[in-house]
Image (cartoon, rainbow, N blue to C red):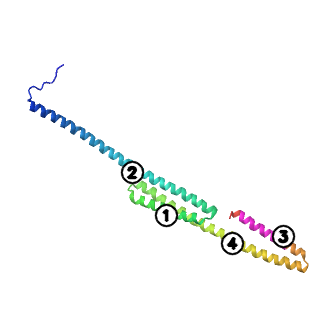
């Protein structure tokens, strides 16, 4: 095997050539490392962007689930704290969607965000209607029906007492039967509306 002979170079030139070769090799390794770090940085930046988007989506989903749970709780229990929680969650979601809308430049994503905001507004308007209906129903069953039943009970009791004193027990019995029917109606209304 033939070896490279560097006898025609002086020792000084051979050392310089070796040093130049090593420096060139170091520069090439440094450039490759720098390009690798640049690529790693771009991947890390992409990963960071993706994770922040995932975090945003998870937060929106969590808040939407919570708003639905609180709305259901309000619908069945009439809890004022659940109603207030729905409104505070609505404001939080709306704020997040609006800030995302302002920070995103992709037109397709902005269309999706606009639709989400639109649906959120429809949802909260529907909830407001449900809240009004729930309060009216509560007022009707808990207060008005009870007050009217108490008035009817009092008047029928007086009517029955009057007819007992007059000796007309048949009318007194009819008044007692009517009174029982009114109490059944009140009880059934409470059960029907689940108040």
Q: Earlier in the sequence, mark 2 or mark 4?
A: 2
Residue at mark 2: 49
**Going 80% across and 68% down the picture, which residue do you hit?**
181
Residue at mark 4: 143
Are the residues at dot 3 and dot 2 in contact (C-beta closer than 8 Å)? no
Are the residues at dot 1 and dot 2 in contact (C-beta closer than 8 Å)? no
Rounded to the nearest angstrom, the CA distance separating label 2 from label 4 is: 55 Å
Residue at mark 3: 177
Residue at mark 1: 91
Label 4: which secondary element: helix
Q: Residues within 10 Å of mark 4 (few under 14, many from 20)?
A: few
Q: Position of residue 99 (x, y in %)?
A: 42, 60
Q: Position of residue 142 (x, y in %)?
A: 69, 69
Q: Earlier in the sequence, mark 3 or mark 2?
A: 2
Nearest the viewer among 96 and 80 is 80
Which contiguous range is marked in magenta? 175-191
Rounded to the nearest angstrom, the CA distance separating label 4 from label 1 is: 32 Å
| In magenta stretch: residue 187 | yes
Rounded to the nearest angstrom, the CA distance separating label 3 from label 4 is: 23 Å
| In magenta stretch: residue 70 | no
Label 1: which secondary element: helix
**Going 86% across and 72% down the picture, which residue do you hit?**
174
């Amino acid at each position: 095997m033939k070896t490279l002979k560097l006898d025609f170079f002086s020792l000084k030139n051979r050392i310089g050539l070796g040093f130049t070769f090593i420096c060139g090799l170091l520069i090439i390794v440094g450039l490759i490392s720098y390009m690798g770090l640049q690529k790693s940085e771009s991947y890390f930046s992409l990963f960071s962007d993706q994770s922040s988007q995932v975090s945003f989506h998870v937060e929106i989903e969590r808040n939407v689930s919570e708003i639905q749970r609180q709305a259901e709780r309000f619908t069945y229990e009439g809890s004022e704290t659940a109603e207030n929680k729905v409104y505070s969650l609505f404001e939080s979601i709306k704020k997040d969607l609006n800030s995302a809308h302002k920070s995103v430049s992709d037109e397709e994503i902005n269309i999706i965000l606009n639709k989400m905001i639109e649906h959120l507004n429809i949802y909260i308007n529907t909830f407001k209607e449900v809240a009004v209906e729930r309060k009216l129903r509560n007022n009707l069953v808990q207060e008005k029906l009870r007050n009217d039943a108490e008035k009817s009970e009092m008047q029928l009791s007086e009517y029955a007492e009057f007819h007992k004193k007059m000796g007309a027990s048949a009318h007194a019995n009819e008044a007692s039967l009517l009174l029982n029917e009114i109490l059944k109606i009140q009880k059934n209304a409470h059960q029907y509306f689940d108040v």
